[in-house]
Image (spheres, helix red, strand yellow):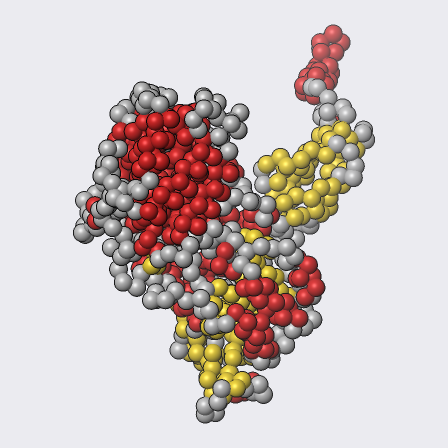
Amino acid sequence: MMKPGVSSQSGAAGDDHGAGRRWWVRFRIIGSSALLLSLLSLAGPPAAAQEPEPVPESAEPKKGSTVLVIPPANRARPPETEMKEQYVLRGGLDEGRKRQRFDQASDLVTGYQSVLTLLSTGLREDAIEALYAFETAAMEGRQPVEIDRLFQAEVEVIRALGRRDVESLVPVLALHHEAYPMYVGRGRPFLAGHASRVAASLADLYAREGGTEGSRVLGARALASLGIFAQLSGVKLQAMGLMLHALEFDPDNEAALLGIATVHERGANYHRAAERLLELLRSHPQHREGRLRMAVNLNRLGEVGQARGLLEELVSEPTLDWVGSLAYQELGTLHREAGNHDRAARVLSEGLERFPEDGRLRTLLAFVLDHQREPKRSLSVIQDLAGAESSATEPSPRRLYGIGPQEAYKEAVAGLEQSAAARMPRLARLVNPGVGDRPAGMP
Amino acid sequence: MTERTERPRRLAPILVSLAALFPLLAAPPAPAQSRIRVAILEPGPFDAVSGETRVVIGVEAAEAVERIALFVDGDLVTELREPPWEVTVGLGPENREHTFRAVAYDVTGARGEMTLQTPAIEVDEVLELPLQQLYVTVTRSGSRATRLGREEFRVVDDGDAQELVTFEGGDAPLTAILLVDSSASMQGERLDAALRGAQAFTAGMRDLDEAMALLFADRLLRATPFTDDPAVLRASLEGVQAGGGTALTDHLYAAFKILDGRQGRKVVVVLSDGLDVYSALRMRDVLWKAQRSQAIVYWIQLRDRPVVGVEPGMYHSSWRDAEANKEEHETLRRLVLESGGRIQEIERIGDVEGAFQNILAELRDQYVLGYYPTDLRHDGSWRQVQVRVRGLGNQVRVREGYVDF
């Protein structure tokens, strides 16, 4: 829990998931069951569960030569379980069959089905806009707490689809997954939360009901990327809940482990961060960002030697990326703080040769040279600062580190989109009867 | 005695003489060294030389000179192959003796040489005379006191009264860096107001004053040239967009560093809320630099968007926890006050322009006092400075001290 008076320096604060959250779900019978039954009968017999395309198995991870040890915590650490959110729909496809008459929900079901029909034609951007139009209209003039009725209507359609063909849920998952950042970008926090909730529910359903290792990994990937986006948006509690949820299905999910470590780090829980990073490096020992964050956190915990070892590894590698640039900065700082100004100057000079556009490296080197009573060299290093940085368009390495694991997020999203595209015909067969395997609008 | 025995006796001395001459007659011819005469014309034998030094060699030779090798302090520094026989050599800054040796060779292989030794400068006593300059603001009853004379000031350095050697009013030229936070929180009207403030500062400058604007986020976004022309400043800032995070500490250090290479009364004006997230240096590092600089720092602290319930500086970030961030904030405040500057809190962004003008006006009303501190120890210790002004009710603001290094 955050101490009173302390805030997190992050993006827009989540403000729509306060006391109104529910910890369990009540199921209501959809009034238009006849419509639903007719839809299902036209869809035909349930398709056999198809093995999703294999998740590429990485080669047996190469074991690193360094054995990392985290020192014991010297103060109480906040338990992660308390930060886990339970708002996500749990339970299998067969739940919700008990029906309750609720006339208004039929419009919601119909409207939502129209969105999915449009989605199944492959017109993804149109489907996103249709979802936006549908959901905003559904909440027009309603109290925020009534969003649960929208959720239930969509869940019923989702469950019905899933009972026919669980693989058809993947494109729907991708739709709501994309809707989450869309709503955040349009300044609609309640609907953003709803999109995240539906996407997480879909991911959970698919992971459980898919019945394969691949479905669990895909579900975990979706949950982890939702969590990372929540963390990027500053909604830390939700982020943590989603990423912990991902680990239930895939304990080695690198996006979730990295994301959880980042949340801990931003909350100054460095020991917890190091623990999760250790898990990440056990299954992904060459993960560059993981090793960098581990070095930074080990240093904070007083394990300077281990931190230095990791940083020296990173700077010795040929990859030219923000991780390498930061590794030079941190290694130079370690040497400087230990009083080894000569070594600091050598490391920073080498870093500046490889990353000449990095203004922080330049500033650190200038400072070290100042300390070494080389004011002229120090001045010449700083005078190139404007020229070096003015053409940069990307965020600085220190800012990329602070923002969070964006690369893991992008990879997860790309993977989900690919999986969704592969399964679109299966959704089309359910929601677009008569079109066959090639729904209208699909290439 | 017969005639035959007398002939051998008369030849003996002649034969002995010839025998004595034989080694000389059989000896090889003497070398032709005497055919080349070499002289080092510059430097002279009494010239104490260092740094870049011109060496001029004179040579007289019966045959054509093929080359002249010049040795300095035992090392071959150059071979000259045609006249003029002169070269400039770098001897380094050290005050010491030097040995010059010039060896000339002609086309027959004959050589001539000369060696010259130059002396070091004889130093009787080393005196280091660093002039300390203090920029003093005096107020009385809330208004700046502007008509004070030299005799009304007393300077105490490390407990000892000091003699003033220079005294100037606010016309002393100033060199200013306007450090403007241009992170994402400054987007739109906030950045516009900040840039208007910077231009207002420049517009109020006088001849020999100069200012540079550094617009920073988590990296440097724009650096203008030093100028006293608001139009130049405006043109240099055209099109700049606020965005990104904040690395105030690093850019404040850069400002001090840039001022190291400038003359004049050095001023840094910082416009920021003071919340640093992405710097690599700590503010205590910049304080170290500030204590070795003579720059005054003013901080226009933006408080128009306070975070409710959060004390300034009390926040976690990926790079520092709340305690560390609070320390950064407090160290910045200390740095500003120690430098002799002040913090002006702004609660409406529209007040920024006035704040810049206010600072410039204060600089115009400052007194610049110069003295040579007595009893410097060069031990890296902190020397406290106090300035007293005769008369009751005078409030004095000046840098609190400096590092004796």
Judging depth in this view, the residue of B211 and B113 nearest the camera is: B211
B22 above or below A156? above
The image quarter containing residue B405 is: bottom left
Whether residue A15 is visible here, answered yes or no, is no
Judging depth in this view, the residue of B265 and A29 nearest the camera is: A29
The image shows a total of numbered marks equal to: 0
Residue, far front: A34
Whether residue B118 is visible here, answered yes or no, is yes
A428 above or below B149? above
A202 above or below B130? above
Residue B380, position in %: x, y?
A: 40, 62
Residue A430, position in %: x, y?
A: 39, 27
A36 above or below B234? above
Residue B204, position in %: x, y?
A: 65, 73
Horizontally, residue A151 falls left or right of residue B347, namely left
Residue B24, position in %: x, y?
A: 70, 21
Which residue is painted at 58% across and 71% down in the image? Answer: B353
Which residue is painted at 65% across and 48% down in the image? Answer: B52
Judging depth in this view, the residue of A403 and B377 nearest the camera is: A403
- Identify the image quadrant of the N terminus of chain B: top right
Which residue is painted at 33% across and 43% down in the image? Answer: A153
The image quarter containing residue B158 is: bottom left
Which residue is painted at 76% across and 24% down in the image? Answer: B108
